[in-house]
Amino acid sequence: MMTTSIDAARMGSRKRSRSPSADHSDGPPPTTRRRSSSPRPRVHVDLPKLNDVDPVRRALRERELAARMAAVELEKASKPKEPESAQDVAEKQADFAKLVGSRSGGVYLPPARLRALQAAAAASDKSGTEYQRLSWDALRKSITGIVNRVNIANIKQVVPELFAENLIRGRGLFSRSVMKAQASSLPFTPVFAALVSIINTKLPQVGELVLTRLISQFRRAFKRNDKIVCNSTTTFIAHLVNQAVAHEIIALQILVLLLERPTDDSIEIAVGFTREVGAFLAENSPKANATVFERFRAVLNEGSISHRVQYMIEVLMQVRKDKYKENPILPEGLDLVEEDEQITHQIQLEDDLQVQEGLNIFKPDPNHLENEEKYKAIKAEILGENSDEESGSESSGEEEEDEDEDAVEEKEGIEDRTETNLVNLRRIIYLTIMNALNYEEAVHKLLKVQLKEGEEIELINMVIECCSQERSYSNFYGLVGERFSKLNRVWMECFEQAFGDYYLTIHRYETNRLRNISRFFGHMLASDAISWVVLGNIRMNEDDTTSSSRIFIKIVMQEMMESMGLKTLAERFKDEEVKAACREMFPTDNPKNTRFSINYFTSIGLGILTEDMREYLKNAPRLIMEQRRAMLEQESSSSDSSETDSDSHSDTGTDSESDSDSSPSGTASSVDSRRRRRTPTPPPPRRDRDRSPEYGRDNDRRRDARRDRDRDDMDSRGRDDSCTPPPRRSPSPPPQYRNDRPSGRRDSPPRRRHASPSPRPREDGRRERDRDMDRRRRDDPRDRERSYSRREDRYERDGRRRDGYKDRSVTPDRKRMDSEERNYSGRRR
């Protein structure tokens, strides 16, 4: 008895034993077994079993039999399939009609069975209603599945799949699916808005339908006081506004409607809507945004709402103060559409909306096949597909490649003079610069732009033009230019070329653009991004500069001084290479240009740069005098050599004549002949007449007065002309006329002529002398040159006196220089 109770206790405490395995059981597993946790069933292959005593031989025979059975099955599969009988086809059509006629698409069918029914229906008629209904259901399921699995990570892969479906036919299905998916998962609203914005660029009717249904849904929910639907709808509309699918006017109308009669629910929805769209409104409609926040502040001051909602408004004010850091316009990874490609729909809140609810319901299309072919062409254009490539024909692909190569060869000789490519390149560069957050990102993106050889200067010009278009100078562009110049020498040379081009055409720009360009190049020079050799383009004088170029130089130099400091800037300009490059900027060739440069740089606060020019201007008179003396000595040496040569020739001639006659008269005649040879024209003959002492003294007075006038003219010419030496007097004596007495420099008495045997009366002789004197004065070239030079000197003196001596500055150095010139010219005479 005791043993029986112990066995019973053991039986009660024993755990449940494991069920026998499928290998040892003939029947199916028990129904209470959990199928979810059971292992996957093994695949059993029915192999023939043979009875043999020897196990090795039995296994060999079984393998041989299995090989023969596999060969038989392979032969059956290789034989062509026999056409189905009419009875089988009729049965399949009946099953398909039953499936189509049932409500809501019928019961579940395995995919293989469904594909078989579709093939049967397509074989009979693809344009029939049955086939269109089946394809409609497949389109609805496909669109819903794609929309439900979209996220930030796979949105770029999902979009091509979505375009592969017929979105024109199923735009109602897509709108309903995306609105349902957004309402059920509000955190994914930016993703759905980005998806709609991408589709809107290629199929604007789809984006317009989605926006129209959202506005209609908001109006119905607002009338019904449905807070949940209003909140989800306004959130979706806010992100569509951020994506530029909807215009900001709809956002402002919704805010006005919600804030017109404030309640707790309306203010709560308005606060959430403003947090999503506030950054966009602050950037694109600042005045309207300020008006909205004034209304929020008025509602807060009224105190007609609960404390919870008041706290929400205060939080919104803080979010605005923080510039919507937690709610950017476009979240990271969702800026997928270019601004120029987006299409914005201006639908207002009070418009008559066409919701088109009939697009959600299946309707037979009599032109179904044609519409499908049209969408295939649209899909190929959107996705860049090629129908020939889809066919998979290698031969056709090779033929197309050959045709493309031929077309390229034909187009090689065509030159595009419309500059379409250049305009597109500039647009790409401009958009890249404007969309960059900082200069490093801008440089990184600009380096990826495909540029042909020689188009580097276009990129540099676009950077400078973008800089000039700003309201005030931004250091962003200077850093971009600096980074480009330090990356490669090609960019540095382009910037140096741009400096010369902009300096020559700076007068074409208005003041603001001129200031921005000047500060840009000032930054480039201060940071050594470009060589200072470019300053050689500047010629600092009154003739080669304009008011615009002087303003340009002023702003460039001031920007360099602010960046480097005045002391460092002055030391840098003392460098030999920089000094050689800037010799036209700090001229020392002409005192007039030097004074102009000194005055200019002193007026802009850079007088420290003019020390060398001031030193040059201080020593300029002494240098000019030394140059004049050297020139005069050189000319005098050359004239002395010529005189010695002429004297030697004349001495030889006089020696031959003096051999025949050794009287004093012969000596005098030799002197006269030597003097005649030195003068360009022979002196006029003198007549021996009896002259009174008073007549000789008058002639002496006239001759002395003429010499004094010549000396004064020489002095005045030496003072007026500061660059050329005073003219030398010819070593030959002046021409002697009939009224002149013999020169006092003669050692021997003049040779007297024999009086004529029959002298003329006194009056007749005076008239003849006057006529001879006038004729000889007209014929003598030296008298003509002297009269011309005197007349020109007089005109020049009068002109300089009228102008007030503009080009001369009366300084102690100038007075000293004039006195030295007069003394020197007197010594020379």
Image (cartoon, rainbow, N blue to C red):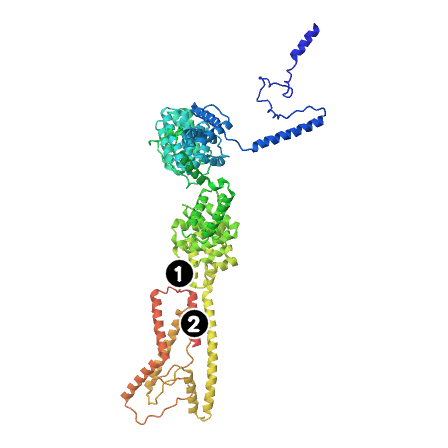
Q: Name the residue under label 1.
A: 543
- Mark 2 and mark 1 lie on one chain; the one further toward the N terminus is 1
Residue 191 in the image: x percent, y percent?
46, 33
Residue 297 visible? The answer is no
Whether residue 227 is situated above or below residue 527 in the rendered picture: above
Q: Residue furthest bottom?
A: 757
User: As rendered, which of 9 and 319 lies closer to the eye?
Assistant: 9
Task: Identify the residue shown where x is 51% and y is 40%.
Answer: 392
Residue 554 in the image: x percent, y percent?
43, 53
Q: How many marks?
A: 2
Q: In this view, does 624 lie to the left or right of 702?
A: right
Q: In which quarter of the image is residue 50?
A: top right
* C-alpha separation, residue under disc 2 versus residue under disc 1: 27 Å
Q: Residue furthest right?
A: 54
Residue 515 visible? The answer is yes
Q: Mark 2 points at which residue?
A: 725
10 Å neighbourhood of mark 1: few (<14), some, or many (≥20)? few
Quadrant assignment for the C terminus: bottom left
Q: Could you tell me which secondary element the residue under label 1 belongs to?
A: loop
Q: Is residue 508 left or right of residue 479?
A: left
